[in-house]
Image (spheres, helix red, strand yellow):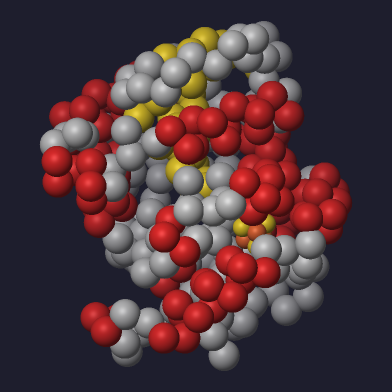
Amino acid sequence: MSFVPPGSGWPGDPAGPGTPVARDAHEVAKLAAESRTLADLTAMQSVCRACPRLVEWREEVADVRRRAFADETYWGRPIAGWGDDAPHTLIVGLAPAAHGGNRTGRIFTGDRSGDWLFASLHRTGLALKETSVHAGDGQRLIGARMMAAVRCAPPANKPTPEERDTCFPWLAAELALVAGTTRVVVALGGFAWQAVWPALRAAGFTLPSRRPAFGHAVEVPLVHGAAPVTLIGCYHPSQQNTFTGRVTAEMLDAVFARAAALGATA
Ligand code: SF4
């Protein structure tokens, strides 16, 4: 089988054999709207099959594998939100990597971007360990939660607008379920910056009428209920960005130290 069967013992697998499976955009919207707990929502996210192109790609990658991981079993399923259930800081990315999250079953885990990200989160007190290698490695987020705007690894790291829209209800529902404690939202990269904006609105956050341009450390004040919330832009720690020095460890640390400080005052 080219994916891990739900409930078969994978560390942290939120789903079981009976978890409802969304098979099209309508079913994603329906199941996301019916989710009352993070446990239900993440279980259903992790078995979704609504985007035919992405399902085919994630399972083909899991079947063929990369030579360096030829002996490993790939997760081959969508990557559910992960982290603290009552977070002050949310970290929103674009989509999992084919041989990263799609292999390890956990967001930003097992790839070079994740190495940079988790090292920074550890230095700034938001992650227990400086590495994130595999689900079940003992890593834990502290006051933080991660999620992707599109939950399946896309070919060439590029989901289509239709795939982004189909996955939207999973993101909006997860944001709504953690909105009560959230004080900071960090968008990793321009795509996440764009994708999270309407999802925050759908989740009940009040946003400025115009969306500022994405930039590193750009901050936008939001409100949820009576609580202030800060949206922060952060360059994605992709290999292209880290190789070229467009983003450095110091730049990541500045954003996450800011997030941790804002979260600590919540
Ligand atoms: S990208 Fe989202 S909506 Fe599409 S199959 Fe994956 S989890 Fe489902």
Q: Residue at x 63, y 14 (%)?
A: 207
Q: Position of residue 184 (x, y in %)?
A: 48, 24
Task: Name the quarter where the N terminus is drawn.
Answer: bottom right
Residue 188 in sight from this viewpoint: yes
Instruction: Please state which of residues 173 and 37 is positioned toward the viewer in this rendering.
Output: 173
Q: Is residue 254 left or right of residue 94?
A: left
Q: Tell me if residue 211 comes above or below residue 238 in the rendering.
A: above
Q: Is residue 190 left or right of residue 168?
A: left
Q: Residue at x 37, y 64 (%)?
A: 100
Q: Tell me if residue 16 comes above or below residue 197 in the rendering.
A: below
Q: Position of residue 163 (x, y in %)?
A: 64, 53
Q: Position of residue 195 (x, y in %)?
A: 57, 35
Q: Residue at x 82, y 45 (%)?
A: 33
Q: Tell me if residue 101 comes above or below residue 71 in the rendering.
A: above
Q: Quadrant of residue 70?
A: bottom left
Q: Quadrant of ligand 1?
A: bottom right
Residue 138 in sight from this viewpoint: no
What is the count of numbered marks?
A: 0
Q: Position of residue 15 (x, y in %)?
A: 66, 68
Q: Quadrant of residue 108?
A: bottom left
Q: Tell me if residue 224 comes above or below residue 115 in the rendering.
A: above
Q: Residue at x 83, y 58 (%)?
A: 27
